[in-house]
């Protein structure tokens, strides 16, 4: 299976990542990728950039020869109503928005099902980031079904399976999420969550977990399939 896109990359703007956009572009071209998304952490992550950064992404080019680059954000979920940390007028300008649960920005509930479902109802949230973090437990069947209903893409995050990750320990949960998606034919997206450009499209941990999935259930194998999945949420509004 060939992975042609990676929709989760952080640059120095995130405050704890170490590469710049042009380094990601060169590395993605070297790996013959067709599309990448730069998704820096939204403002509530300590040390990240401010709203103005996301408001000015319009000055960046989207095409670098055969490589397409999308500019978005990894939003922080900041309260139990599912609010995120960029205002609507900025969200409208993003090419892609991932929403994720991060402990510096929200304390886990004993059961996070309702919270995750509320976030999925936000029309601007295209992707739910790193589901399967063992600190944020939820009803997998209900959440996966709600993702399908709302047109939200579930991300299977490579970095969550890295033994050095703060999210480490969720392999069984992630496998169950994948199985549940497979059951209802819901395509997933793999995200590297690169914090250094050499890790763009590094799916070394997750590749093993999805090796038996049919091609059409993995959005990283086709730009068109990925764009159709993004467009689906808009159609459901
Ligand atoms: Zn994250
Ligand atoms: Zn991230």
Image: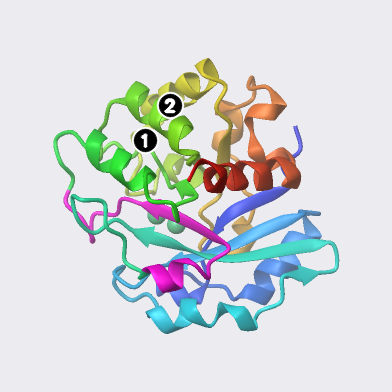
Tell which of 107 and 24 is nearer to you.
107
The residue lying at 36 percent from left, 69 percent from top is 86
User: Disc 1, disc 2: CB below 8 Å?
Assistant: yes
Horizontal and vertical percent position of residue 176: 41, 22
Sequence-first disc among 1 and 2: 1
Horizontal and vertical percent position of residue 92: 49, 67
Query: Disc 1 marks which residue?
Result: 132
Which contiguous range is marked in magenta? 88-107
- Indicate which disc residue 177 carries: 2
Give the quarter the ligand 2 occupies.
Answer: bottom left
Q: Quadrant of residue 29?
A: bottom right
Figure check: 180 above or below 121: above
User: How far apart in space, not on screen, are marks 1 and 2 (Cα)?
Assistant: 7 Å
Horizontal and vertical percent position of residue 2: 76, 38
**What colour scheme has been applied to the protein in the rendered image?**
rainbow
The residue lying at 51 percent from left, 15 percent from top is 183
In terms of secondary structure, where does tag 1 sit? loop
**Disc 1 within 8 angstroms of ligand 1 (CB):** no
Left or right, residue 95 beside residue 180: right
The residue lying at 39 percent from left, 79 percent from top is 51
The furthest residue to the right: 65
Left or right, residue 222 beside residue 42: right
The residue lying at 50 percent from left, 24 percent from top is 181
The furthest residue to the left: 110
Number of marks in the rendered image = 2
In terms of secondary structure, where does tag 2 sit? helix
Instruction: Count neighbours of disc 2 (C-alpha within 10 A) and say few if under 14, some if 14 to 19, many if 20 or more.
Output: many
Residue 124 lies in magenta, yes or no? Answer: no
Instruction: Count neighbours of disc 1 (C-alpha within 10 A) and say few if under 14, some if 14 to 19, many if 20 or more.
Output: many
Left or right, residue 118 beside residue 74: left
The furthest residue to the top: 183
The N terminus sits in image quarter: top right
């Amino acid at each position: 299976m060939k992975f042609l896109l990676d929709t989760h990359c952080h640059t120095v703007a995130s405050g704890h990542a170490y590469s710049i956009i042009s380094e990601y572009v060169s590395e993605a071209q070297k790996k013959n990728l067709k599309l990448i998304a730069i998704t820096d952490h939204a403002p509530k992550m300590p040390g990240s950039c401010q709203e103005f950064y996301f408001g000015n992404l319009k000055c960046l080019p989207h095409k670098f020869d055969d490589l397409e680059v999308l500019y978005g954000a990894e939003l922080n979920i900041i309260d139990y109503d599912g609010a995120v940390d960029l205002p609507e007028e900025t969200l409208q300008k993003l090419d892609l928005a991932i929403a994720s649960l991060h402990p510096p920005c929200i304390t886990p509930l004993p059961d996070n099902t309702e919270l995750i479902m509320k976030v999925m109802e936000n029309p601007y949230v295209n992707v739910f980031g790193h589901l399967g973090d063992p600190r944020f437990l939820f009803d997998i069947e209900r959440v996966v079904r709600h993702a399908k209903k709302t047109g939200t893409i579930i991300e299977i995050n490579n970095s969550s399976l890295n033994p050095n990750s703060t999210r480490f320990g969720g392999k069984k949960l992630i496998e169950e999420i994948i199985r549940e998606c497979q059951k209802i034919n819901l395509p997933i997206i793999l995200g590297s969550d690169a914090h250094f450009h050499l890790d763009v499209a590094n799916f070394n941990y997750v590749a093993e977990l999805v090796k038996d999935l049919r091609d059409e259930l993995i959005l990283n194998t086709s730009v068109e399939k990925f764009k159709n999945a993004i467009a689906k949420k808009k159609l459901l509004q």
